[in-house]
Image (spheres, helix red, strand yellow):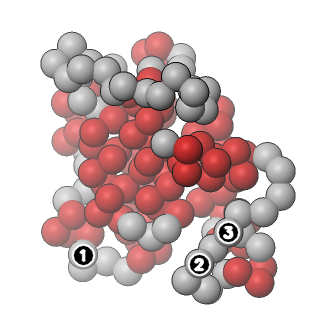
Amino acid sequence: MNRERLADEAPSWLAMETFAAHAKSVMLVRWIESILDAIEQDHGEPDNWEALYLTYAVGALVESQYVAALKFTGMSLADPAIHPRPRLPTDGPGPVSLTELRAAVALIKAGPSAAWGPAMVGTKRRVPYGAGTATRFAGTICAW
């Protein structure tokens, strides 16, 4: 995986400040999808480091925290030979798979009503409902 090329594709947070929220989300989702494609081509599943920070990035996108999403996505590209592996709690959630990350990104692309109850859309506090990826993903983010 060419981490330098993927890092160069990152949107600038200064440039992002001039765009509307939807445009910021679209730019970040495209960048995350290109990283997921590279992971799939390189080694199939994200390692713990990549999964941890991509999970954080998706969670930040859900909460419209675009600068945090940008930072977490960039951290997922850190070369594992240079940076130590994160210390994950032994009683924490299991690893997040590439399929789960893609499903979470698809929910973000589908819009707020796909992942959040209709009564919660547009409110400050959004709570995921239902079984499946959105609930598991929200639980994973909270557990870390």
Q: Is residue 75 above or below residue 91?
A: below
Label drawn at residue 127:
3
Q: Is residue 20 above or below residue 1?
A: below
From the image, tell me which residue sits under label 2: 125
The answer to whether mark 3 and mark 1 are in CB contact below 8 A is no
Q: Marks 3 and 2, Cα distance to the nearest angstrom?
A: 7 Å
Residue type (three-letter) at the residue carrying disc 2: Arg
Q: Quadrant of residue 16?
A: bottom left
From the image, tell me which residue sits under label 1: 17
Left or right of 60: which side holds 6? left
Disc nearer the start of the sequence (2/1): 1
- Residue 26, position in %: x, y? 45, 62
The answer to whether mark 3 and mark 2 are in CB contact below 8 A is yes
Residue type (three-letter) at the residue carrying disc 1: Glu
Is residue 18 at all visible to an observer of this figure?
yes
Disc nearer the start of the sequence (3/1): 1
Left or right of 133: which side holds 66? left
Q: Quadrant of the N terminus?
A: top left
